[in-house]
Image: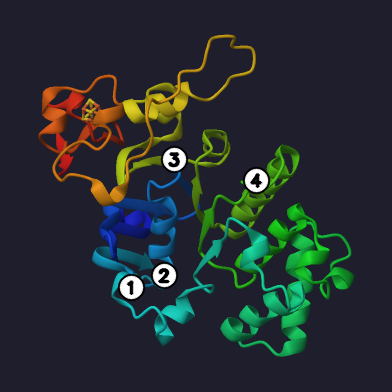
Amino acid sequence: MKEVDDILQVRNLRTYFRTDNGLVRAVDRISLGVRRGETVGIVGESGCGKSVTALSIMNLVRPPGRIVAGQILYRSGDGSTTDIAKLHPNGRQMRSLRGNNIAMIFQEPMTALTPVYSIGDQIAEGVMLHKKLTRRQARERAIEILGKVGIPSPEKRIDDYPHQFSGGMRQRAMIAMALSCEPEVVIADEPTTALDVTIEAQILRLMKEMQSQLDLSIIMITHDLGVIAEMADRVNVMYTGKIVEHAQTDDIFYNPKHPYTLGLLQSIPTIGDKRRLTPIRGAVPNLLTLPEDVCYFAPRCPYAMEICAQAEPPMYQVGTAHQCKCWLYEGNEVVAV
Ligand code: SF4
């Protein structure tokens, strides 16, 4: 992967939460890149650090959480590079980047949208702030973008409040809000989890259309491998705050290497396949009580060896643009420790 192509580079990022009960390493030395116009997936079970990764990139982690190390390099259209991890979360530069260059679609629009402001006012606020438009121009922009995301009669619905929209329409409004300032990167955190399957298909199609119209880069965060198959060009599989496998989407589905990825794939049903599903045994461990320098997947892994409980595996190169953090590939080139 050539870094020069990347609009966003996350390098060795660590985001920790210092709680009364101990230190939680929610994101622990992860690295990933996003190129212009591509969709990069982050997949894993709940509690593996996906959403904290998204909040870190948006510089929205709040105490007791903190980005303690690493870089989040954003390369803007003029070629300049900014390390988001070094910006003050509420500083002028970060507020200008957030929403304008990098935007986020949240998981649950009913809680992300403010109930006491109309949908139109919530979209117009960001446009006025970032694009320096008048209230009237911002309203016209809000109507235009609501129309683009498929809200019928946007000139009438613009004055509705969030509770007057259906679940699918609220998610469309969230997408409209995220795209209203024409960002270059959109982070979508489980954007379809709360929706039924037909609305999910519509929202994913809409995101693809918007991506090709605006040359957007998307980070798609989900626990749903079906969404990943539909949307992502490349995939990062996360477990206990670490990326354990990275590959092109086809390789993740047809040539998975990490036992955790295999477990995820074996636990999803396929139409017409009558074999019993094989769930991953056990559960994601409590991040508060993790020992250091072991493979955290070892208690659940059917291939665990002695070394897995004694040392953390490095990231090995296991194919073209395919990396895996597992002792099974000892002997391959080490790309990260
Ligand atoms: Fe399983 Fe060991 Fe690989 Fe961890 S390092 S996934 S325990 S084989």
Residue at image location 32% in from the left, 26% down from the top: 259
Distance from Cα at disc 1 to Cα at disc 3? 31 Å
| Rendered location of residue 308, percent (x, y) | 16, 30
Closest to the camera, between mark 3 and mark 2, is 3
What residue sits 67% from the left and 73% below the top? 114
* Residue type highlighted by circle 1: Thr
Would you say residue 258 is visible in this rendering?
no
Q: Are marks 4 and 1 in contact (CB under 8 Å)?
A: no
- Three-letter code, disc 2: Ser
Of pointers 3 and 2, the one earlier in the residue sequence: 3
Distance from Cα at disc 4 to Cα at disc 1 = 30 Å
Pick whichever of labels 4 and 2 is earlier in the sequence.
2
In the depicted structure, whether residue 141 falls above or below residue 232: below
Disc 1 residue crowd, few under 14, some 14–19, many 20+, Cα 10 Å: some
Q: Would you say the residues marked 2 and 1 are in contact, meaning their CB atoms lie under 8 Å apart?
A: yes
Residue 91 rendering spot, x and y as whole percentages: 40, 85
Which amino acid type is shown beneath numbered disc 4?
Leu
Point out the tag, 3 or 4, that comes first from the N-terminus. Answer: 3
Residue designated by label 3: 45
Q: Is residue 58 left or right of residue 21?
A: right
Which residue, given by chain and number where applicable, does mark 1 sit on?
82
Report the side of 312 relative to 1 (left or right): left
Q: Point out the frontmost of discs 4 and 1.
A: 4
Which type of secondary structure does the marked residue at label 3 adopt?
Answer: loop
Residue 227: which numbered mark, if any?
none
Measured as percent of width and height from the top left, residue 306 is found at 12, 24
Q: Which picture quadrant has residue 21?
A: bottom left
Of mark 1 and mark 3, the one earlier in the sequence is 3
